[in-house]
Image (cartoon, helix red, strand yellow):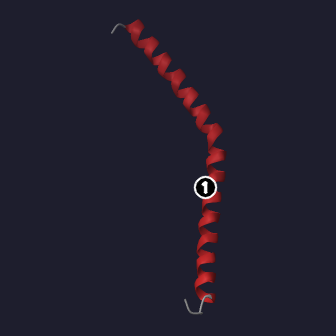
Amino acid sequence: MGAKDWREEQERLEQVRNKLQARIAELEPEVAGLRDQASDIRKRFWEEVSINTSTGGGSL
């Protein structure tokens, strides 16, 4: 691989890296929101399980 080829490959890799960083920056807020939603769902699930098991004292 010659010096020119090496330089072109470095430039191409830099462009790919920049595109990936831009896309990551776009997706980070969405991922954070989904993470919060998942946490809320888990919390509510366990609260409901606790409520259902503590109030279910009847017979089957």
Is disc 1 surrounded by few (<14), some (14 to 19) or many (20+) residues within 10 Å?
A: few
- How many dots with numbers? 1
The foreground one among 23 and 9 is: 23
Q: Does residue 37 appear to the left or right of 14 in the view shown?
A: right
Q: Position of residue 60 (x, y in %)?
A: 55, 89
Residue farthest to the front, as pictured: 60
Amino acid type, residue under disc 1 in the picture: Arg
Residue 26 relative to residue 10: left or right: right
Q: Please name the residue shown 63% across and 38% down the image.
A: 25
Residue picked out by circle 1? 35
Could you say which is closer to the camera, residue 7 or residue 26?
A: 26
Q: Quadrant of residue 41?
A: bottom right
Q: For residue 53, what is the image quadrant? A: bottom right
Q: Residue furthest bottom?
A: 58
Front position in the image: 13 or 43: 43
Residue 13 versus residue 21 in the image, above or below: above
Q: Position of residue 47 (x, y in %)?
A: 62, 76
Query: In which quadrant of the rendered image does the N terminus lie?
Result: top left
In this rendering, the answer to whether 24 lies above or below 32 is above
Q: In the rendered view, does 57 fall on the left or right side of 2?
A: right
Q: Quadrant of residue 27?
A: top right
The residue shown at (59%, 37%) is 24
Residue 24 to residue 54: above or below: above
> Who's the residue at 44% across and 12% down the image?
7
Residue 34 is situated, as x and y percent measured from the top left of the image, at 63, 52
Q: Identify which residue is drawn at 63% across, 76% down.
A: 48
Circle 1: element type: helix
